[in-house]
Amino acid sequence: MPIAPHPPETWIRPTAAGLYCEPGDFYIDPQQPVSRAVITHAHGDHARAGNAQVLATPETLAIMQTRYGGDAGGSLQPLGYGERLRVGGTEIRLAPAGHILGSAQIVLDFHGVRVVVSGDYKRRADPTCTPFEPVCADLFVTEATFGLPVFHHPPAAAEIDKLLHSLRLFPDRCHLVGVYALGKCQRVLALLRQAGYDEPIYLHGALLALTRLYEAFGIALGAVLPASGVTRDSLKGRIVLAPPSAFAEPCSRRLPDPVVAQASGWMRIRQRAKASGVELPLVISDHADWDELNMTLDEVAAGEVWVTHGREEALVYYANKRGYRARALTLIGFEEEE
């Protein structure tokens, strides 16, 4: 096979600020303010405030504006899925990543060479976002949050069934479910509605703004009500969603004998659930598991793979063993938001 005239490592590279595309003069998910940023999705460890110019999907920009207000960026340029934009010598396209609303893979074409930067992604069906689209590439930069063979996510519907079964078992107890404000909250709401649960669901105040934004984008989540100002007895037999950080707040301690649950891929690790005081762990992940990571490598069919955002070593080892040219790409600043 002839060597490409512009191999990826000559025009895209990791820097202290983030992954830098030289011919386009922009950074992907920069970790500090830069002049030009292309953002994969709106979780805070990927979408920082203060960049001069920001390119992302319309949904991601709307979430950033909701979170950061005027600090979302000096100028905001929306690019829908499948649309193409030339920046310098690079053509940019955004492909669905299936992680949260508006999440995108960054597809870069430069002189016949294609690089796909996945951002965070999942391969399971999710009624709150567009499903992942495999894009063939010469270089695939993939996340590896759950990049260990121990991680095999169960069906999300089965985890929701556990929650509803517990609700039937303990009709006088409130079920307090820990969810992150962006993505997980709205997905759990949608899964509950898919399972036939049509009662009002109560939300911690930190979850309300983004849930309303999802609804503004046409995602039906059913009746949701603020949990504040509600009497203790009226929350018996009800579901309350809150950030995990809110478990220790006084308002949580006023709930009627709560069953504490948490929805996260990390709930696969029993010690982690126990240490967090979680009585009902719900293994619902917004990232690809081990099998799905490897399936995605095969579908993208990139000769070269850079692995980042998680358990790089295991996936790098296994990808090399399977014939890929893989290496770890350690980028600082990314967290385990799940």
Image (cartoon, rainbow, N blue to C red):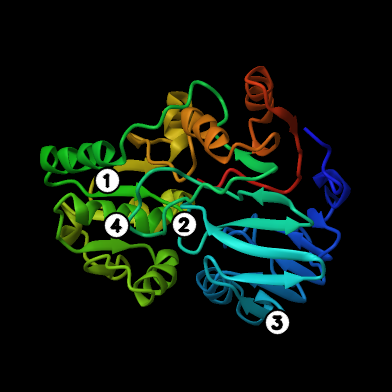
Which label belongs to residue 258?
1
How packed mark 4 is, by other alpha carbons closer than 10 Å (few <14, some 14-19, many 20 or more), is many
Q: Residue at x 54, y 30 (%)?
A: 294
Q: Nearer the viewer, mark 3 or mark 1?
A: 3
Image mark count: 4
Tell me, yes or no, whether the two marked residues, 2 and 1, touch with CB atoms within 8 Å: no
Tell me, yes or no, whether the two marked residues, 2 and 4, touch with CB atoms within 8 Å: no
- The relative height of residue 327 versus residue 11 in the rendered view (above or below) is above
Tell me, yes or no, whether the two marked residues, 3 and 1, touch with CB atoms within 8 Å: no
Tag 2 residue:
100
Quadrant of residue 39 in the image?
bottom right
Which of the two labelled residues, at mark 2 and mark 3, occupies the earlier sequence position? 3
Q: Mark 4 and mark 3: span between their CA atoms?
A: 33 Å
Q: Secondary structure at mark 1?
A: loop
Which of the two labelled residues, at mark 2 and mark 1, occupies the earlier sequence position? 2
Tag 3 residue:
75
Q: Mark 3 and mark 1: span between their CA atoms?
A: 45 Å
Q: Mark 2 and mark 1: span between their CA atoms?
A: 28 Å
- The relative height of residue 40 versus residue 57 in the rendered view (above or below) is above
Q: Pick the residue in front: 283 or 207.
A: 283
Which label belongs to residue 238?
none
Residue 104 screen position, x and y as percent: 56, 58
Residue 143 screen position, x and y as percent: 62, 41
Amino acid at circle 1: Pro
Amino acid at circle 2: Ile
Q: Pick the residue in front: 327 or 205.
A: 327
Residue 190 screen position, x and y as percent: 28, 57
Q: Nearer the viewer, mark 2 or mark 4?
A: 2
- The relative height of residue 329 versus residue 215 in the rendered view (above or below) is above
How packed mark 1 is, by other alpha carbons closer than 10 Å (few <14, some 14-19, many 20 or more), is many
Q: Pick the residue in front: 327 or 331.
A: 327
Q: Secondary structure at mark 3?
A: strand
